[in-house]
Image (cartoon, rainbow, N blue to C red):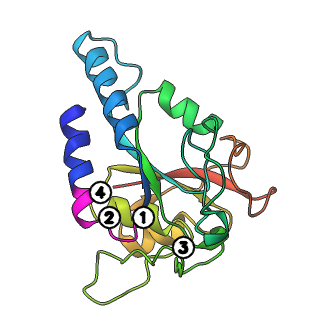
Amino acid sequence: STEVVEYFLERIQNTSKSVFITVTSERARIEARAADARLSAGCALSPLDGIPAAWKDLIDIKDTRRTVGSSLFQDVPVSESDAPVVQNAASAGLVMLGKVNLAEFAYSALGQNSHFGTPLNPNSSDEYAPGGSSCGSGVAVASGFVPLSIGSDTAGSIRIPASYCGVVGLKTSKGHISTEGCFPLSRTQDTLGPLAH
């Protein structure tokens, strides 16, 4: 896991313009070392133990700001704790690489962001839309910056960037995964889910 995390951190540092808003490299390295110790001892927490993941920046992650893709939240205090979904992922051994860009307030089908820049769709040499609002999640996976990203979907915000970027996205059933600690767009329709190859 440590080698994998270092590989992705180097890729993110060199080529992830407008994709990551926050990179949690210190936390990622600590979690990767812990995963390696568990894997060496033969006591993995789950089949995902040691796998790096990125998170849409509307989800609370301890010691990071939740910007929701807006300059209005660039100076808010850092989160004091992980959202329950992040806690559950950590309990399964996922390694937190950082938080990715999104359409401002998670409200766009195209994935444009004038505050942090629009992530470029890696499947085009032109500036094709990445799809929104989990644009950073789709682009991060499609560009090879991370094998897994967690986004949110209210009316297509996982499925659209997955389709545009050529990866797989899943809108989970409402209430299946807690959205506590996540900025709401629609409290009756918001869901969280993965994007991956």
Mark 1 lies on residue: 138
Q: Which is more foreground, mark 4 or mark 2?
A: 4
Q: Which of the labelled discs sits on residue 145, or is there none?
A: 4
Marks 4 and 3, the one that precedes in the sequence: 3
Q: Position of residue 85 (x, y in %)?
A: 60, 38
Q: Where is mark 3, residue-wise?
A: 132
Membership of 135 in magenta stretch: no
Q: Amino acid at mark 3?
A: Gly
In the picture, the quarter occupied by the N terminus is top left
Amino acid type at circle 1 is Gly
Q: Amino acid at mark 2?
A: Ala
- Number of the label disc, if any, that sits on residue 142: 2
Observer-side mark, 1 or 4, equals: 4
The image shows residue 128 at horizontal and vertical percentages of: 38, 86
Residue under the image location 70 percent in, 46 percent down:
179
- The residues tagged by marks 4 and 2 sit, at their Cα atoms, a distance apart of 8 Å
Q: Residue furthest bottom?
A: 126
The alpha-carbon separation of the residues under discs 2 and 1 comes to: 6 Å
